[in-house]
Image (tube, rainbow, N blue to C red):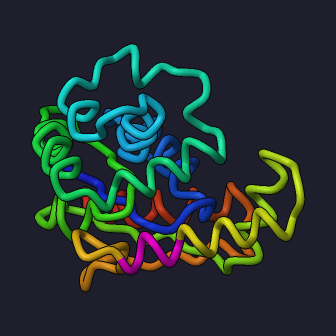
Amino acid sequence: MQFTVAIDGPAAAGKGTISRAVAARFGFRHLDTGLLYRAVGAKGGDPVAAALGLTAEDLARADLRSMEAGQAASRVAVIPEVRAALVDFQRRFARSDGGAVLDGRDIGTVICPEAEVKLYITASAEVRAHRRWREVGGDAGQVLAALQERDARDMGRADAPLRVAADAVLIDTSALDVDAAVAEAIKVVAQRLG
C-alpha cells in the first residue's frame, strides 16, 4: 500500500514529535526531511557536493539537532541545486510500499503534492521559541530572534517557501499538549485511511 502523510510547519511547532507518533501508530516509515538539510549544512564545504554525496553516516551525526545545524539547514535549503539533489530521494521514500510520513517545510506543497494526508503544524512564535529554549538553553530572547529569522528565511525563500498547502489540515499546537496534538493528527489520518 502506498499512503503518504505530508507534515509541514515552522521550527519547534511539534511536527517532528507528531510525525514520529503518527508513523509509529500506523506502522509507516518516517523521514525527517529537515535532517537531510541539517546534514548537508553540518558537513560544510560546497553544499551542492555535500547534498549529492549525503550518506547514512551523515544523517546519524550527534550534532544535527543543535541550533547551529538548524540555522545551517535553513541557509543551504535556499540553494536550488541542493533542493534538487534531495527531492528525488524524498519522493521515492514517500511512495515506498507500507506507507510513509515525511515532515519538513515543503512536503505537501512541493515534494508530495499528491499526498493522501497533508497536515500543517504551527504554534505562535513565542510558544515555539519557549519550546526551543527548553531544548537548547541559552538566552530566551536570542532563541526567539533566531527562530523569527529562520521563519522569515523559510517563508521568504524563492524556491519552495514554507506555506500551508491549500488542502492541508491546520493544527495549532500553541495551547495543546503533546498527547492532544498527536491525537488530532492521528484522527485525521485514520479518517483518510477509512
Q: Where is residue 172 in the image (x, y as percent from the top left)?
A: 58, 77
Q: Residue furthest top?
A: 57
Image coordinates for residue 155, horizontal then vertical, percent? 41, 77
Question: In the image, is residue 183 above or below residue 26?
Answer: below
Characterize the magenta stretch by its predominant secondary structure. helix
Judged left or right of residue 188, residue 160 is left
Furthest residue in direction front, as rendered: 45
Which is more toward the observer, 13 or 115? 13
Q: Residue at x 46, y 67 (%)?
A: 9
Tell me the quarter of the picture where residue 111 sits. bottom left
Tell me if residue 1 can be seen. no
Residue 155 colored in magenta in the image: yes
Residue 118 position in % (x across, y down): 30, 67
Q: In which quarter of the image is residue 39?
A: top left
In this view, 177 is above or below 164: above
Note whether 176 is above or below 18 in the view shown. Answer: below
Depth check, front residue: 193 or 117:
117
x and y percent of residue 126 in the render? 76, 77
Q: Which image quarter is the N terminus in?
A: top left
What residue sits 36% from the left and 58% below the top? 190
The residue stretch that appears in magenta: 151-156
**Residue at x 52%, y 57% (from the top left corner):** 15
- Counting labels gives 0
